[in-house]
Amino acid sequence: MHEKNYDFLTRMQEVFKPALRDRSLTPAEDEFEIDSNWNIILEEDASPLMIRAADDLHEFLFKSMKVCVGIRTDEVPGGKIILKTDAQGLPGNAASVEADEDQLCLTSANVRGVLFGVIYLEDVMRLRRAPFLKKGRYTHEPLARMRSTHSGSGLDDFPDWQLNAILHAGFTAIDVFVCGIDRTTRGYCNLNQLIEHAENYGLDVVLYSYLSCYKHPDEPDADAFFDHVYGSLFRQYPKAKAIHLVGESLEFPSRDAATVKKSEVETGSDGLQSPGRPTGYYPGSDYPAYIAKIRDTIHKAAPAAEVIFNTYNWGWAPLEARKKFLENFPEGVTLQVTYDIFKQNRRAGLACPVMDYSIFAEEPGFYFTSEVETAAALGIRDIRVTSNLAGTTWDFGCVPYVPVPFRWIRRMKILKKYLLEYGVNSFYDSHHYGWWPNPCNDLAKAILSGREPEDMEAFLRQLAARDYGTESAETIVETWRIWSNAMDHYVASNEDQYGPWRVGPAYPFLFQPVISRTMDEKAVTFPTLPQSYRGANIIKTLYHPYENDSQSPGPIRYPIEIRELQTMLSEWENGLVLLENALESMEKSKRPDGERLYALGKFIRNAIRTTVGIKKWWLANMHLQVASNPETMLSRLEEIESLADAEIANVKDTIPCVELDSRLGWEPRMEYVCDKWHLEWKLRQMQIAKQELSAYRKMILL
């Protein structure tokens, strides 16, 4: 059955899947069963959030387990689930459980801990596929201080159902892009109302700053200027938990000689590129004072607000420059560091670094390890990581998640080590590509806790059995293993992550010779919907290498990268074949989810084909344009035409995937970039390219 665009939102709203219970199961000796004779017991003066916790458990049991329990303030015969707070309870949002055959008591020092504890119990029953829980005493202890995410339903879109889904996925805060008072990327937004609604679901709000404050902190009018920008913001939103600052959206007129003297949005009088770095992209000597001024301004208005500064944009810089910045890092500010970006990788002796968010990097790069370890040694106590543990990256920019759980497990375990040893206890789990319900939600909750499963592969089998059926579980896990290993051959360059990886098979193949009487440019503006927030700005349509001084040049990288990606393609295909065979025997109720997993895998397979094709296309176009005789040029044209025909077939093969699952081809900021319409646009573009090939052939034969 075909989905229309945005139909995926209906599926996402279903937090509690119906009829998860397997009635063939019986409690083990150390378990007890909750049935409809049980009641949830609250104190008479229970807070709204405590009532939500009780309602949540009631709804889960009814919808997913077909058990109808009561909610009461008085005790009656039958089993009891007692929810309460105790100031002497476990610290933070931890909860303790004491349970026997006819009573379970869940206690935390605060109501949020009770709510998170209830969701933990739901997770246990969901995985068990029955309303069975363990007897005895045990705890639920989330180790992370904060886990935040952007919306999965649309950029800065947070209806109540999305807040509820975010809560159940294991996040504790939401990230909202703020462009001004009551203004987000969507336009008007009553942010105080959003903060209140988020609080009703036990969630904090982090304001991701898109505010301009182009003023040096030493200028005479700096106090008033900063107060106008940041003081007014927190006077308006005193309950906002934190503000997230990042260099690319936080420039100022630095006096450091290594930086550009004008804001990135201003142009020089002579039109020549400055040799310096824009201030948001370099750890200048006066940047710490700039951050300190922002901190002081905010804390005057809201003393408890957390100020977060993200060094993402200068992770490339030498350690000496970054260390000097950290030595002057303002007290009372949280340092945010990215896990994977700039991680160096060598292939056949060439430098092929990770240029943006990627699960190719299971282990962190030198930027992350050196930044965190230096910060900890300098006594910086609050450290946050851009982790992407929601399961999405720029690896495949318009898919709901990257289905490589073995890689995610390795990343999570490493981050847990940094949490315990270096205090990296706050996680930015997704950028604006948001999140989607997927195994990473369960893995992160399990690993970043005091009750990590001893056998993570067995845990994966349980997840696969829950979502795809017991008979298919082994095959699903093996498919995940194959795909996880295939990512060893992924290429994380800028031209790919801002090009074919970002929009998949909808990426245009532009014939590079300029055939024009009006001297037009070859790059086209990628078509995006009106509601897209500058989505076309982050898609580069004219494919060519984006070079930098830590990366080998494209012309010598591409043959190696093509070879690696062809290996990835072959391995990914092996996983697809395995999964396709499993679909035949999958339980009827699980089959739709199995088919969507297959469509996701096929979409990614076709994106790999597109990326291999565009690299070959660029090389062939370059060879064509430097050829010095007609025979060689005609031969190159044949090669280019063959690549065009293969890509046309690949695009057509992708259409059934996006018709089956409307989440494929969509990303919150860009909106749809690889739905059926965009794939048909690509087919039209390919026909134009073929017409240009024909015209160029005639030109060669003049």
Image: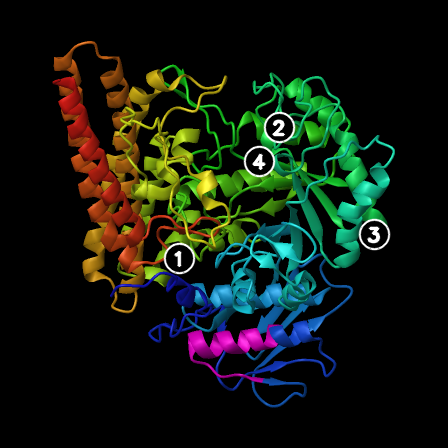
- Kindly identify which residue carries mark 4: 338
- Per the image, label 3 sits on a secondary structure element best described as helix
Name the residue: 66% across, 22% down: 260
Q: Position of residue 431 (x, y in %)?
A: 53, 46
Q: Considering the whole magenta stretch, tell me its main secondary structure.
A: helix
Question: Which residues, given as a range, are shown in magenta?
Answer: 53-70
Q: CA distance from mark 4 to mark 2?
A: 14 Å
Specify the quadrant of the image occupied by residue 698: top left
Q: CA distance from mark 3 to mark 2?
A: 28 Å
Name the residue: 56% across, 80% down: 102
Q: Earlier in the sequence, mark 3 or mark 4?
A: 3
Q: Quadrant of the N terminus?
A: bottom left
Foreground mark, 4 or 1?
A: 4
Q: Earlier in the sequence, mark 4 or mark 1?
A: 4
- Kindly identify which residue carries mark 2: 281
| Residue 633 appears left or right of 293 | left
Name the residue: 49% across, 39% down: 411
Q: Position of residue 400 (x, y in %)?
A: 40, 52
